[in-house]
Amino acid sequence: GDVENLVFLEAARVLKLALDMHLQEHVVAMQYDGSSPKPPQRFKPKDFPVWVEKQIAAFANGQARALINGLLLGQTEELDPGVMESFARTGLIHILSVSGLHVGFMLLIFKIDASLLRFPQRWQWPLVLLALWCYAYLTGMKPPIVRASVMATVLFLGRVFERDTNLPNNLGAGALLILLAQPLQLFQLGFQLSFLAMFGISYLYKPILVLLARFVSWRWPPLRWAVKLLAVSLAAQLA
């Protein structure tokens, strides 16, 4: 009886060791072949640009995808040199470099979307500004985009809180916020030209518009819009 018990115990010990080794080998094999279940990964902010690039890749490919990346994100690495040369010859190369122009277009698109989706008026501008900063993060928080986003945020916060706004004061507040975060931007030409242009528009736009109104009839809406755009451009150039 004692011998049988010892044999049984030894057999059980050997069986347990074999089972443990088999389970260990199975776990290692699952880890190497990728069949083991992976814990769900949380979506992180750094994954957002990758996700957007995947959506663009699913929508278009080849040079079409490269052009979309260039126009929206300023990524021109995949663009064909011939396409770049065509943009340069036509004087449109600047639209492939993200700037305040892109922020203006994005603001317009986000505002139209918020209106079409019939969000309450009080929530439209906060949602638009949130979408704008998501776009700024998507483009890598480049200085021109950050400057334009800060200025847009300061300008439109008055609408969020239903307060009257003063353009020169808002521009000063925007410049102060940018310099508090990055003081060395004061010596960057882009920072200086951006704010000079905006101050020029705030002070010279109306006088130029009044001057142009003496020579142009305001009855035709398309011409009125064209004259206003011309006045904005002249004011920025004179500054």
Image (cartoon, grey):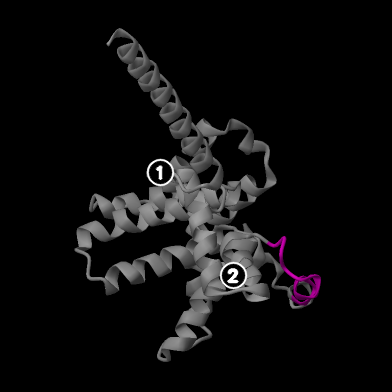
Q: Is residue 136 visible?
A: no
For the point 19% across and 63% down, the residue is: 120
The answer to whether residue 217 is above or below residue 120 is below
- Looking at the image, which residue sits at the far bottom? 220
Q: Is residue 74 visible?
A: yes
The answer to whether residue 39 is above or below residue 86 is above
For the point 57% across and 64% down, the residue is: 235
Specify the quadrant that holds the N terminus. Answer: top left
Q: Which mark is residue 163?
A: none
Q: Amino acid at mark 1?
A: Gln
Pointer 1 residue:
41
Q: Nearer the viewer, mark 1 or mark 2?
A: 1
Query: Is 209 or 18 nearer to us in this picture?
Result: 18
Element class at badge 1: loop
Pointer 2 residue:
68
Q: Position of 200 compared to 76: left or right?
A: left
Q: Amino acid at mark 2?
A: Ile
First in sequence: mark 1 vs mark 2: 1
Q: Position of 202 compared to 85: left or right?
A: left
Q: Which residues are magenta?
A: 76-86
Image position, residue 148 (x, y; %): 51, 52
Element class at badge 2: helix
Q: Position of 124 compared to 225: left or right?
A: left
Indicate yes or no whether the magenta region holds residue 151.
no
